[in-house]
Amino acid sequence: MGGQGDRAAEAGAQVGWTAVAVAAARAAEAERGAPWFVDPYAAHFVAAWSRAHGPRPEEAAGGRGAEERWRTWVTSYVQIRTRFYDEFLVRSGARQVVLLAAGLDTRAFRMAWPDGTHLFEVDVPSVLAFKEAVLAERDALPRCARAVLGLDLRDDWPSALRGAGHVPDRPTAWLAEGLHPYLTPDAYRALVREVGRLSGPGSVLGLDLHSRSRREAMRRALASAGGDDAVGPLWHAHGENEPAAVLAEHGWPPEAHSPAERSRAYGRPLPPPIEAAVEAAGFPRLVTASVA
C-alpha cells in the first residue's frame, strides 16, 4: 500500500489543481444527508494530490477569497452538473460511452451499467496515470468494460479510439464535462465534427458550454471574488458567442439548461445568494444533443 501511495503522490505532482478541485466538489456531495451521487474515490484523489502539493485544491487556486468562492459557487455547480450528466448517460441507453477529457471521473466504477457496456476514457497521460495509481491503491474494479486512452485531444484520438474497440456505426453516448472553455473556436468545431463522424444513429452528446459573454462574466466574477483569477488565464478569451449553434450546424440539435433550474428540478434549490452568484457569474449551460 505504501508503494502505491508513493506512486499516486508522484503522479499527482503532474496533475493540475482544477481536476482535483472537481473531485473535491464530488467528494463533498457524499457528505450530504441525501446525496445525489456518491463518488467513493473522489476524496482519495484529493488526499493523494495533497501529498504531492501540500495545499487543498481551493487553496492552490490562490487568493484570499478562493476557498469561499469554491465552496459557494463552483462546488454547487459541479454537483449539479454531475447529477445531470449521470442521468443523461443512463437515459441514453448506449452501450458505448466516451468520456472526452475524462479527468478524475469514476463513472465506470460508481455507476451500474447494463451488460455489454464499453466505456472509453480519453485524457492526457499525466492525469490518467494519477487516476490509475489512486484507483489501484483502492483496489477499484470497473463495473463495465473500460479502456483508458492517454493522449491529448490535439492528437489523433479518433484512431486511438477505434483501435481500443469503439465502433463508429453504433450508438455512442459522448460526454465532455468542463472541456469547452479550454478549446479554441477551431478546436471546438473540429471536436464536434470528429464526434459526428464517429457516431452511429441514436448517438447523444453532453457538454457544458460557455458563450463568449458568459465566459467573460465568469472571469470577471472570479477575479472580483476576493483574489487572483487562477482559472481564467487557462481559458481562451475569444470563442463562439453561441457555441450551441455550432452543434446544430453539425447535425446535433441542442437542448440547454441552467444549473440553477436543474437544482430546483432536483428538489434542492440553491440558496438565493448562491443562485444569484452562479447566474451572475455566467456559469456554463448544461447542454445535451442527439444525432439529427
Image (cartoon, rainbow, N blue to C red):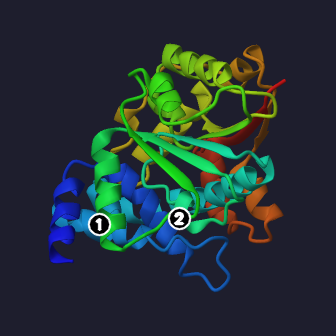
Which is more toward the observer, 290 or 178? 290
Image quadrant assignment for residue 76: bottom right
Q: Which mark is residue 109?
A: 2
Amino acid at the residue labelled 1: Arg
Q: Residues within 10 Å of mark 1 (few under 14, many from 20)?
A: some
Q: Is residue 96 above or below residue 166?
A: below
Total labels: the figure holds 2
Task: Name the side, left or right, on which 203 lies relative to 179.
Answer: right
Which is more toward the observer, 189 or 72? 189
* Residue 278 image offset from top left, x and y in percent: 61, 52
For image coordinates 51% across by 63% down, the residue present is: 142
Q: Is residue 266 above or below residue 176?
A: below
Q: Which mark is residue 56?
A: 1
Asked if residue 153 can be seen in this view, the reply is yes
For image coordinates 27% across by 57% down, the residue present is: 60
* Residue 259 image offset from top left, x and y in percent: 69, 52
For image coordinates 29% across by 51% down, the residue present is: 129
Q: Residue furthest bottom?
A: 33
First in sequence, mark 1 or 2: give its number. 1
Q: Quadrant of the C terminus?
A: top right
Q: Which mark is residue 17?
A: none
Disc 2 element: helix
Asked if residue 71 can be seen in this view, the reply is no
